[in-house]
């Protein structure tokens, strides 16, 4: 090897028996370069490489931005779509359920009531869809490049937060128009959104890993989300649900989130203790999603 | 310093991994887990591969398709895990398994540089610092804000390689990227990879271009059926690979394969008159004769014949289309019988014949088929035979003049 850098650093006298660094710019990384190992994963509960995830935080941003940028390319209405989609839902449910079926809404004008729930639900359902497709969408990457696989579902559920933000502004406009005041609990709103992102992440982990292996997920999901919407107190109040049905409601991790979200945003009655059960279920979804994903992630390239 | 250690790497694929079971089958498989499943077909891509590589070393990997080369690279690049054994890598591993993975057609060249760079492990600040270099290397300055879908394929290829080449990993893993792009671009890629090695990085290089391997690498591993057959100098490994690869027979015939749109039927050598020969002498022209079958729906075909020396140098690399536009190319279904006459220029040595058949969209055949020896003339002296050369045409020596010595100084 040709070494010509002895004179580059005047503070270090050239010593014959100490090999000088190969080139100036690469010295630090060489000295720190650590061994990484690729061996079969054996443990049932695999370790998640947190330092590595932290080191690739920029990539999450890049991938999320890519999803945002791509979404509105060659669309006429662009960002307006993120308001139009929930508004269409609000209009339909207001006419069918609010006016025709006269579904109660905790004394709050039905459009405001349903919009507050739909805003959060649409974030969840869009992000779950995007999350499910995230690995399959990056199929080329997964089979050709190493990157922490966890980033794919993570980057997929983040862009929806922009839509959620826009929806929240629109809900604010509705609240002004219909004269609905938020409760003091609105200070908790960021916390509920954070919890929603975590639960959504858990669902996205499960769906993306399963979808990589079984494309049945894609077909089942549209159907599943439709049922899930009506198993969640979005278009009706949770107080409409009684007895054993209330228990089923508590098993739904999204139900509790919608309940507390609406409580904070538009001042519906304070949620019952059942939401704690719902939160706990959400936590297990996240935890089990992480474990399942970590167990199969190193073989994605083999079967995706 | 040691940079890669591979110990007893073994990789098993189940055929089910390829065709992907449905959820129902997955559930029933899970229910019967632990029991031996005889119906599952297994394929061992690697069987106990061990080797080490040092910093600054360029290591070539050769072997036929399906020998396990790409699987080995995927394990080194941590894209997949081994079934048994382990690999240890020191520093950042950069894989160039396919140029341009992660490019998004709707995004501009600029956005794609950030996207691709990020995927390959660069920080935004690093990309920003090298942005101009990347754009310059790719030569796409004018189009940098145009969506990549409007790029020519050559342009996006250059951009993709430029990004990958500026990632600066400690270990570079390259798989056949040079199979695409024009000659000038390939030369630049090779140059860039040599620079990597000179900088003290480790380069792992898979290629069918044996010439590039022997030119770039000081060492080459020949993989066959997932095992290392030879780990030696490129000359030695290539020699052994070619010897095993191509049978020393004057003609090779192939069984019919209904699944192939285009397939070789036979490849052989003939003399000028069309009579089969098995060992031409260096002063006689000989022909390479190729018979192939084309089934429906294949368009215009181009047939290539190349000759490779034992050191991996392509002495000839000729294509039917080289004759120019006036000569019609083979087109449509039929059994085609084509020969190319090689003038008496080759030095006496061993050669391997490679055949390629491709349409503008697809390569159907590209492989080394048979080996043969060009014999010296009966009156060639031994020293003349052993002299280092690639071609040996009949050259003409002339004495142009001779002047007296004292006349020159006057």
Image (cartoon, grey):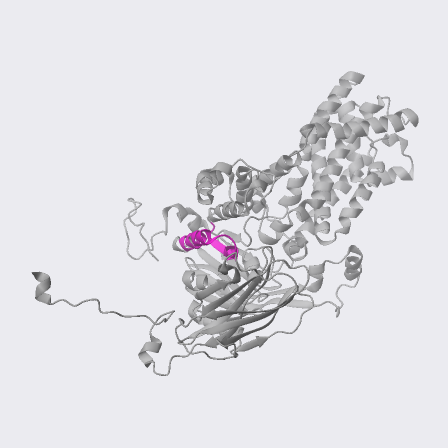
Give percent across and percent down for residue A204: 71, 44
On the image, the x and y values in percent for residue B209 come to 48, 62
User: Can residue A260 be seen here?
Assistant: no
Q: Is residue B410 left or right of residue B204?
A: left
Q: Residue A82 sits in which quadrant?
A: top right
At horizontal 53% and vertical 38% (from top left) the residue drawn is B110
Taking the magenta stretch, the answer to whether it contains residue B171 is: yes
Count of marks placed on residues:
0
Quadrant position of residue B313: bottom left
Q: Is residue B254 shown above or below B103?
A: below
- B4 shown above or below B278: above
Identify the image quadrant of the N terminus of chain A.
Answer: bottom left
Q: Is residue B119 left or right of residue B137?
A: right
Frontmost residue, B321 versus A27: B321
Give the quadrant of residue A95: top right
Residue A21 horizontal side relative to residue A187, left or right? left
Residue displayed at 76% across by 49% down: A217
Numbered range of the magenta stretch: B169-195
Q: Is residue B389 visible?
A: yes
Where is residue A283 shown, x and y percent of the image? Answer: 73, 42
Q: Is residue A195 magenta?
A: no
């Amino acid at each position: 090897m040709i070494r010509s850098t002895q004179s580059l650093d005047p503070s270090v006298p050239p010593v014959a028996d100490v090999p000088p660094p190969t080139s100036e710019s690469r010295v630090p990384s060489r000295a720190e370069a650590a061994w990484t190992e690729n061996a079969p994963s054996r443990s049932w509960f695999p370790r998640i490489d947190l330092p590595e995830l932290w080191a690739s935080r920029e990539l999450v941003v890049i991938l999320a931005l890519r999803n945002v940028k791509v979404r509105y390319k060659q669309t006429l209405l662009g960002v307006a779509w993120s308001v139009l989609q929930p508004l269409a839902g609000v209009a339909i449910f207001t006419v069918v359920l609010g006016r025709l079926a006269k579904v109660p809404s905790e004394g709050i004008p039905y459009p405001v009531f349903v919009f507050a729930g739909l805003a959060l639900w649409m974030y969840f359902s869009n992000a779950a869809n995007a999350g499910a497709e995230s690995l399959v969408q990056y199929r080329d990457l997964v089979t050709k490049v190493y990157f922490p696989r966890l980033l794919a579902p993570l980057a997929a559920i983040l862009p929806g937060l922009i839509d959620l933000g826009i929806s929240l502004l629109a809900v604010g406009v509705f609240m002004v128009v219909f004269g609905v005041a938020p409760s003091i609990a609105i200070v908790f709103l960021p916390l509920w959104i954070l919890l929603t992102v975590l639960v959504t992440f858990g669902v996205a982990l499960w769906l993306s890993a399963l979808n990589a292996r079984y494309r049945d997920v894609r077909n089942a999901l549209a159907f599943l989300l439709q049922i899930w919407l009506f198993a969640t107190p979005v278009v009706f109040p949770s107080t409409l649900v009684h007895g054993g049905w209330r228990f089923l409601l508590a098993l739904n991790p999204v139900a509790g989130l919608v309940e507390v979200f609406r409580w904070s945003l538009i001042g519906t009655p304070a949620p019952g203790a059942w939401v704690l059960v719902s939160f706990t279920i959400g936590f297990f979804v996240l935890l089990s999603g992480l474990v399942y994903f970590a167990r199969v992630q190193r073989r994605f390239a083999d079967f995706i | 310093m040691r940079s890669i250690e591979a110990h007893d790497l073994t990789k098993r694929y189940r055929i089910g991994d390829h065709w992907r079971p449905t959820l129902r089958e997955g559930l029933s498989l899970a229910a019967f887990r632990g029991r031996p499943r005889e119906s599952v077909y297994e394929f061992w891509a690697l069987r106990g591969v061990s080797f080490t590589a040092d910093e600054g070393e360029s290591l070539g990997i050769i072997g036929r398709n399906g020998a396990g080369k790409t699987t080995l690279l995927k394990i080194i690049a941590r894209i997949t895990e081994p079934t048994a054994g382990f690999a240890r890598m020191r520093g950042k591993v950069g894989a160039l398994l396919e140029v341009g993975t992660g490019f998004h057609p709707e995004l501009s060249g600029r956005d794609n540089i950030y996207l691709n760079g990020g995927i390959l492990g660069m920080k935004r600040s690093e990309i920003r610092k090298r942005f101009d270099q990347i754009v310059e290397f790719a030569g796409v300055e004018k189009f940098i804000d145009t969506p990549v879908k409007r790029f020519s394929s050559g342009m996006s290829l250059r951009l993709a390689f430029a990004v990958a080449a500026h990632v600066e990993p400690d270990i570079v893993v390259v798989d056949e990227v040079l199979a695409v792009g024009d000659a000038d671009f390939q030369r630049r890629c090779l140059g860039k990879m040599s620079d990597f090695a000179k900088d003290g990085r480790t380069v792992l290089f898979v290629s069918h271009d044996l010439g590039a391997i022997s030119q770039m690498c000081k060492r080459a591993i020949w993989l066959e059926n997932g095992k290392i057959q030879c780990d030696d100098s490129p000359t030695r490994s290539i020699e052994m690979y070619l010897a095993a690869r191509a049978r020393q027979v004057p003609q090779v015939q192939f069984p019919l394969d209904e699944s192939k749109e285009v397939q070789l039927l036979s490849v052989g050598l003939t003399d000028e008159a069309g009579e089969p020969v098995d060992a031409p002498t260096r002063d006689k022209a000989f022909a390479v004769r190729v018979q192939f079958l084309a089934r429906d729906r294949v368009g215009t075909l181009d047939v290539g014949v190349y000759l490779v020396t034992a050191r991996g140098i392509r002495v000839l690399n000729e294509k039917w289309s080289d004759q120019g536009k006036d000569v019609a190319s083979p087109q449509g279904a039929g059994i085609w019988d084509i020969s190319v006459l090689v003038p008496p220029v080759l030095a006496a040595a061993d050669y391997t014949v490679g055949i390629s058949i491709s349409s503008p969209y697809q390569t159907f055949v590209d492989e080394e088929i048979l080996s043969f020896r060009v014999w010296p003339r009966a009156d060639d002296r031994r020293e003349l035979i052993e002299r280092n050369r690639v071609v040996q045409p009949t050259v003409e020596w002339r004495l142009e003049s001779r002047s007296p010595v004292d006349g020159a100084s006057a």
